[in-house]
C-alpha cells in the first residue's frame, strides 16, 4: 500500500488578506485586490496597477526573537515566512510527540527577490560611457561597490526563503526550491507529495512565494505585452476568459501547505483538510514564447495527474484554471480542458481566482490549490469575476461573477509557466 | 513493485578546461588550470580579478539551424546548458530531435519524447549588465553631468524601457535553461528547474532519479549550468567576502580546496548535463553504461541560511540519507567527490561532514575536488563534479586537486594531491552544499554490475 499524503495546515498571504478566512471570504464575495501600484511610482508605465499585499509587516507574524533573526529577508521571502508560520501553527505539527525534524522538509516554488533598484540603476547610469556608448566596467564597479549592500544582494537568491523556513522551524529534511516560472509552486507541491509517498520525508512545508511588483518585473512583462493596460478601470482589469481580456494583472504573496503522510497525521490526531491524490508535470517543448497551439502539454499534464490519482475525468468536480487573462492562455487552456474532458467539458465548472487576486507568478499555484481545498470544505466554488463578454473560443462554464454552492469532492488545479512548463494537481476531500 | 534501476549513459560538460567530458577530464588529470585573469570585462577595480572562463564554444553549433535565431535570447547560463546538453546526448548515443534536425545521425528519433524529461539546476541569472545599463542610461535625468546623473523612473516608464528587446525577461528566467533544452531535444516528460545555489545540480539529478524510479520518464537530461562571469556576478561574491584576492598575479594558484593556505573561492562558469536512463532501456539499446546512481539524500543547514555549520551536520544528514537510500554502508565508500570551494569556513564544514561519515576510514578514502582548476560557477558545479567523478570511476584514475599542497589539519581528509592516482572504487559519493541558503545534497554512484 503506497503512502497517502494529506494536507494538515495552510497559510495564505495574498492581495485579499493576510490569513485564510479573510482571503477566502473576499474571494467568495467576488472582491478585487487590484488597485493603483503603490510599491513604486508606476505613473508612466504602460501598466500602472497591480494586486499588492497591503499592510504587510513580518513582525506581525513572528515573535520578537524570531523576527530579529529573519528581518533581513526580501519581500517575497517575508511573505513565505509569514504564510509558513500560519500553516505550521494551523497544523500543530510542532506539538507532535517525538517529531523527527530530519524527516520534515521544505519544497518551495519561490521567486527571486526584487533587485536593489535605486542603487542598481544609480550605478548603471553612473557607469555608462555615453561617448563610447558602452559600459565603463571600472566606473560601474567603483559606484556599485559602495552602493550595493551585501545582505540585500544575498537575500535575492530564490532559495533563501526555503533556507529561512528551515531555520525558523528547525526542520532538516530535504530542502528544495524550484523556479519554473508561473508553474513553480504547483510543481513544488507535486514533487513534495512524491517525496512523502516515496518515504524521503514524513511531512513537507510546501508552497510558493513571489513578488514581481517592482520596476524590472513590470518592465519585463510590459515589454512582453503580457499585462493588462486598463489603467482607467483597473479594478476590473483582470478578466480571464472574457472576450475583451487584454493580459494578466500582477499580484504578489505566498501560499503554504503542510503536507503530511496520512498515518503520521493520524497518529498525532491531526486535523485533516484534504488529500493530494494526483500530480502531472510535462513540458511543451515547443517555443519559449508561445504555448503549443493544440494545448498538447497541458492536456498531457492534466491526464497524468488524473491517472496518478487513479481517477477518470468524470470524477473531477471543479477546475481551478491557470486562467491568466491573456488571449492565448485562456483560449488554449479551454482547448486543453476540452481535450481531456471531451463532451463533458461544458459540465465541469472552471474558474480563475486571478480575476480577484491577480497572478502571483511562482506563488500562484499554491494559492490556487488552497482555494480548491476551501471549495471542498465549504462546498462553494469561487467565481471568475469580470466575466462580461462571452468569447466563442472560451465556451466552458466559468462560474461567472458569482460564487456557486454545489457539492465539491475533487478538484483539479492547473499551472502553466512561460516556456511551456505544465503542472497539474488533483486534490480531494479526505475519506479514510 | 521492484524499484527501477537508473544508470548514467551520457556525460556532457562545458568548462574552463574545454568542451566535452573527455577534454575536461584529460585536462584535470594533466593538472591544467582554467583560471585566468578575467577577459569578459575589465575587472581592474575588483579585489579579485580572476575566474574560470569558458572560451572557444559556440552555442550555434549545438542547436538545429532553424533554432539559431533563438540563441539571441539566451543569457550566458542558458547557452552553457544548451552546449552541455548537446554533448550529453551525443555522448549517450541518443538520436534526439536536435541531432536528427542537424543531420548528425542516421535514421529517425530513437527517443519517445513523452518519456524524456529534464531536471536542470540554475542560478539567479544576472542580467547582461551592458545591455541593461545601456537601456537604463537613456533614462538618466542629467546624462551630461557625470557625477550626479540621476535615474528617472518616470522617464524609464515613458520611454526608456522601449530600449530593451521585447523578449528581455525571457533571457533571465531560470527555467529557460530547461525550456530551451527541452525544445531543442524535444523532451516532453516532467521538466523541473532547481534553484538552490551550489546544491542545484545534485538536487536536480536526485529529482531526475526519482522521476525515472517512479515511472514518469524513462530518460532524463539533468544537471545544471551557471555563469558568474559578469560584473554583477563578481560583485555579488565580492560583497559576500568569499573571494580569494591575493592571487591576481598567479591565478592558477588561487583556488586551493582544503589546503592550509586557502583564502577564498574563485568565480567560474560552466555547465554539466548527464543522461540518466532506466536500466532496461539502456541495455536494450546497447548503451555505454558509465555507472549506476543508487542513492540520493538531501537536507539543509537549519542553524543559519548564510553561515556553514562547523560540524557539517546538514551535509552529514544528506550523506547518511543517500547511503540509506542506496542500501550501502559507509564502509563501502571508495571515493568521495567534494565541493571544496576554497573558503576557510565552507571547506572546514564540508570536511567535518565527510569525516563524520567515513569515521576511521577518513585517512584512507580518497577525496577529489575540481575547483582548483575550474573555479565555482554555482548551479553547474555539482554536475561537473559528478561527471568528473563518474569518469574517474570509469577510467580508474583520480585527478588530483590542483593547489591542495598541504591538507589543512582543520579539514583532515585524504584529498588527492600532487599526481593522479589509480583507483578502482566500486562505490562513490558526491556531495554539494549551497553557500547561501544552506541546502545540502549527496548522491551515491556505484560501478555498474549487471
Image (spheres, rainbow, N blue to C red):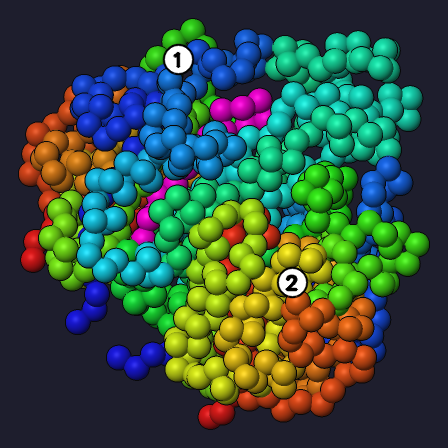
Image point (50%, 60%), residue name: B440
* Residue B81 placement: quadrant: bottom right
Mark 1 and 2 residues: CB-CB less than 8 Å, in contact?
A: no
Image point (24%, 55%), residue name: A260
Pinpoint the chain carrying mark 2: B
Q: Say whether residue A208 is magenta.
A: yes
Image point (7%, 58%), residue name: A432
Pinpoint the chain carrying mark 1: A
Q: Nearer the viewer, mark 1 or mark 2?
A: 2
Residue furthest front as drawn:
B409
* Residue A175 placement: quadrant: bottom left
Instruction: Give the spatial CA distance, label 1 vs label 2.
Output: 50 Å
Image point (45%, 32%), residue name: A68
Query: Does residue A387 appear left or right of residue B396 in this picture?
Result: left
Q: Quick check: can you spot residue A60?
A: yes
Seen from the viewer's position, the closer of residues A390 and B359 is: B359
Q: Is residue B144 above or below residue A194?
A: above
| Residue A22 at x, y percent in the picture | 22, 23
| Residue B60 at x, y percent in the picture | 73, 55
Position of the N terminus of chain B, as image quadrant, is bottom left
* Residue B321 placement: quadrant: bottom left
The residue that mark 2 highlights is B347
Query: Does residue A378 appear left or right of residue A335 in this picture?
Result: left
Q: Secondary structure at mark 2?
A: helix
The stretch in magenta equals A204-219
Q: On residue A35, which mark appears?
A: 1
Amino acid at each position: 500500500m503506497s503512502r497517502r499524503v494529506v494536507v494538515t495546515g495552510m497559510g495564505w498571504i495574498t492581495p485579499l488578506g493576510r490569513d485564510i478566512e479573510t482571503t477566502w471570504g473576499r474571494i467568495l464575495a467576488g472582491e478585487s485586490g487590484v488597485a493603483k501600484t503603490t510599491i513604486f511610482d508606476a505613473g508612466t508605465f504602460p501598466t500602472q496597477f497591480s494586486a499588492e499585499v497591503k499592510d504587510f509587516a513580518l513582525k506581525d507574524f513572528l515573535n520578537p526573537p524570531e523576527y530579529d533573526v529573519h528581518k533581513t529577508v526580501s519581500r517575497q521571502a517575508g511573505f513565505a515566512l509569514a504564510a509558513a508560520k500560519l500553516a505550521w501553527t494551523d497544523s500543530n505539527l510542532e506539538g507532535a510527540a517525538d517529531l523527527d525534524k530530519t524527516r520534515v522538509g521544505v519544497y518551495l516554488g519561490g521567486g527571486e527577490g526584487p533587485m536593489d533598484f535605486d542603487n542598481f540603476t544609480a550605478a548603471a547610469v553612473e557607469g555608462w560611457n555615453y561617448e563610447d556608448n558602452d559600459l565603463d566596467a571600472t566606473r560601474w564597479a567603483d559606484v556599485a561597490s559602495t552602493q550595493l549592500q551585501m545582505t540585500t544582494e544575498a537575500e535575492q537568491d530564490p532559495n533563501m526563503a526555503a533556507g529561512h523556513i528551515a531555520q525558523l522551524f528547525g526542520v532538516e529534511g530535504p530542502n528544495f526550491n524550484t523556479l519554473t516560472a508561473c508553474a513553480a509552486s504547483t510543481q513544488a507541491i507535486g514533487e513534495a507529495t512524491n517525496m512523502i509517498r516515496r518515504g524521503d520525508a514524513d511531512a513537507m512545508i510546501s508552497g510558493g512565494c513571489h513578488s514581481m511588483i517592482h520596476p524590472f518585473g513590470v518592465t519585463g512583462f510590459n515589454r512582453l505585452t503580457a499585462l493588462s493596460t486598463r489603467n482607467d478601470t483597473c479594478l476590473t482589469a483582470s478578466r480571464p476568459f472574457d472576450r475583451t481580456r487584454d493580459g494578466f494583472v500582477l499580484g504578489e504573496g505566498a501560499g503554504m501547505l503542510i503536507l503530511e503522510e496520512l498515518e503520521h497525521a493520524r497518529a498525532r490526531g491531526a486535523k485533516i483538510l484534504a488529500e493530494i491524490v494526483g500530480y502531472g508535470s510535462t513540458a511543451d517543448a515547443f517555443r519559449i514564447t508561445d504555448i503549443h497551439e493544440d494545448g498538447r502539454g497541458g492536456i498531457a499534464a492534466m491526464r497524468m495527474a488524473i491517472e496518478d490519482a487513479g481517477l477518470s475525468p468524470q470524477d473531477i468536480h471543479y477546475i481551478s484554471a491557470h486562467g491568466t487573462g491573456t488571449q492565448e492562455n485562456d483560449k488554449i487552456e479551454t482547448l486543453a480542458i476540452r481535450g481531456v474532458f471531451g463532451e463533458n467539458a461544458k459540465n465541469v465548472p472552471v474558474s480563475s481566482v486571478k480575476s480577484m487576486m491577480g497572478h502571483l507568478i511562482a506563488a500562484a499555484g499554491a494559492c490556487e490549490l488552497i482555494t480548491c481545498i476551501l471549495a471542498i470544505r465549504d462546498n462553494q466554488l469561487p467565481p471568475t469575476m469580470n466575466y462580461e463578454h462571452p468569447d466563442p473560443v472560451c465556451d466552458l462554464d466559468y462560474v461567472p461573477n458569482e460564487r456557486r454552492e454545489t457539492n465539491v469532492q475533487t478538484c483539479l488545479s492547473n499551472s502553466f509557466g512561460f516556456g511551456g512548463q505544465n503542472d497539474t494537481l488533483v486534490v480531494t476531500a479526505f475519506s479514510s | 513493485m521492484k524499484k527501477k534501476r537508473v544508470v548514467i549513459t551520457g556525460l556532457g560538460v562545458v568548462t574552463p578546461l574545454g568542451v566535452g567530458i573527455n577534454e575536461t577530464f584529460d585536462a584535470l588529470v594533466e593538472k591544467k588550470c582554467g583560471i585566468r585573469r578575467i577577459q569578459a570585462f575589465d575587472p581592474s577595480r575588483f579585489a579579485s580579478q580572476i575566474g574560470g572562463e569558458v572560451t572557444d564554444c559556440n552555442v550555434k553549433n549545438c542547436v538545429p539551424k532553424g533554432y539559431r535565431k533563438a540563441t539571441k535570447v539566451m543569457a550566458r547560463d542558458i547557452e552553457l546548458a544548451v552546449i552541455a546538453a548537446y554533448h550529453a546526448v551525443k555522448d549517450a548515443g541518443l538520436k534526439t530531435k536536435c541531432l536528427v534536425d542537424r543531420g548528425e545521425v542516421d535514421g529517425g528519433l530513437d527517443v519517445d519524447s513523452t518519456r524524456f524529461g529534464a531536471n536542470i539546476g540554475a542560478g539567479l541569472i544576472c542580467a547582461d549588465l551592458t545591455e541593461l545599463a545601456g537601456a537604463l542610461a537613456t533614462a538618466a535625468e542629467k546624462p551630461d553631468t557625470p557625477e550626479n546623473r540621476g535615474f528617472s523612473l518616470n522617464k524609464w516608464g515613458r520611454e526608456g524601457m522601449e530600449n530593451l528587446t521585447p523578449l528581455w525577461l525571457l533571457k533571465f528566467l531560470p527555467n529557460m535553461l530547461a525550456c530551451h533544452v527541452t525544445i531543442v531535444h524535444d523532451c516532453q516528460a516532467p521538466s523541473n528547474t532547481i534553484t538552490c545555489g551550489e546544491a542545484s545540480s545534485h538536487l536536480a539529478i536526485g529529482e531526475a532519479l526519482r522521476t525515472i524510479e517512479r515511472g514518469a520518464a524513462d530518460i532524463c537530461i539533468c544537471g545544471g549550468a551557471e555563469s558568474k562571469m559578469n560584473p554583477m556576478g563578481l560583485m555579488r561574491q565580492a560583497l559576500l567576502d568569499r573571494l580569494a584576492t591575493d592571487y591576481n598575479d598567479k591565478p592558477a594558484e588561487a583556488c586551493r580546496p582544503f589546503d592550509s593556505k586557502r583564502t577564498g573561492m574563485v568565480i567560474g562558469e560552466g555547465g554539466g548535463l548527464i543522461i540518466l536512463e532506466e536500466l532496461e532501456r539502456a541495455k536494450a539499446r546497447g548503451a555505454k553504461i558509465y555507472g549506476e546512481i543508487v542513492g540520493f539524500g538531501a537536507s539543509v543547514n537549519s542553524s543559519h541560511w548564510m553561515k556553514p555549520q562547523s560540524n557539517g551536520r546538514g551535509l552529514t544528514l544528506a550523506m547518511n540519507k543517500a547511503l540509506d537510500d542506496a542500501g550501502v554502508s559507509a564502509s563501502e565508500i571508495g571515493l568521495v567527490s567534494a565541493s571544496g570551494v576554497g573558503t576557510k569556513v565552507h571547506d572546514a564544514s564540508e570536511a567535518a561532514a565527510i569525516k563524520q561519515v567515513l569515521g576511521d576510514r577518513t585517512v584512507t578514502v580518497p577525496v577529489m575536488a575540481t575547483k582548483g582548476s575550474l573555479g565555482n560557477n554555482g548551479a553547474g558545479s555539482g554536475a561537473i563534479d559528478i561527471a568528473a567523478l563518474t569518469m574517474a570511476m570509469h577510467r580508474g584514475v583520480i585527478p588530483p586537486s590542483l593547489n591542495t599542497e598541504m591538507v589543512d589539519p582543520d579539514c583532515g581528509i585524504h584529498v588527492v594531491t600532487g599526481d593522479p592516482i589509480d583507483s578502482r572504487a566500486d562505490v562513490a559519493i558526491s556531495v554539494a552544499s549551497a553557500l547561501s541558503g544552506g541546502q545540502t545534497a549527496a548522491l551515491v554512484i556505484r560501478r555498474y554490475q549487471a
